[in-house]
Amino acid sequence: MAQTPSQDPSAERIKASAAETVREGTDIRAKMHELTLLALQRQRFDRHGMREVVRAVTEGAALGAEKSRADMRQAMSEAVSGLDQALRTSAEAGQAALKQLAATGKGFSDSEFKQALANLRKLEDDFLSTVEQVADAANERVQPGLRDAVRTARRTGTQTGKQVALAMGDFAQKFSAASLDAALVGLEAAGEFGARFAAVASGILGGLAEALRAPPPSAERKDKPKES
């Protein structure tokens, strides 16, 4: 059974877990989703941290694929889909954090709001660009499948992008696209979200992750005999 990162959420440990998941070749999408979500919870909620998780998971997937007998293109497609699902949850947490901060409005300036929203808008591009970078460095056996997975994601759209679009729609009347573009200019390369936003979003992400891992309520009732 594939490992999950425990108290050491380092890139190497995440990479090793992802490699084992793909090498085993079973339930790749679900396992990569859980692995990525757990790793994201343990990072500061910012673009740099998310990119590092995506890179470690993708590099691990590529390493595992080298030693797997599974269909390469299918394995890479499932791995990227699992990553996408986890990042969609992060985008959902960011959207919920912005709504919460907008509702309270205490000590959260328009400038901070625009910075957080502008960085959130870059999430899909950061995700796909990072996977492409890993694909460029992958060996000739893995590279075609990983590149194909990215091309398909760009062509059909990602779950992450759809969730970010919902967030943008929520605040379209508050900020224009041009004002968000301006907010990105001059930001640090790390793409730091504001500290208050990051704290709120991290808390919401933790709650969403726990809810996703919880068994459905109906599961406990399936084995109960019917009353006569």
Image (spheres, rainbow, N blue to C red):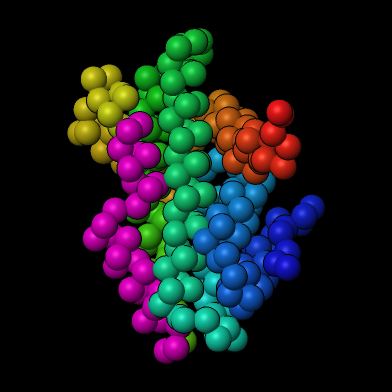
Q: Is residue 141 left or right of residue 44?
A: left
What are the residue bounds of the magenta stretch?
A: 140-167
The foreground one among 199 and 141 is 141
Q: Residue 124: x and y, percent?
A: 37, 50
User: In front here: 96 or 11?
Assistant: 96
Q: Position of residue 31 (x, y in %)?
A: 60, 60
Residue closer to the observer: 87 or 51 = 87
Q: Which secondary structure is most common in the magenta stretch?
A: helix
Residue 158 covered by magenta stretch? yes
- Badge count: 0
Residue pictured at 57% horizontal, 83% vertical? 68
In the figure, is residue 210 to the left or right of 132? right
Image position, residue 62 (x, y; %): 52, 76
Residue 102 pos. (x, y %): 43, 16
Could one spot residue 57 in this view of the protein?
no
The answer to whether residue 180 is visible is: yes
> Which residue reaches farthest bottom?
140
Tell me what residue is drawn at x 55 percent, y 66 percent. 28
For the point 57% across and 65% down, which residue is it?
27
Magenta-colored stretch includes residue 3: no
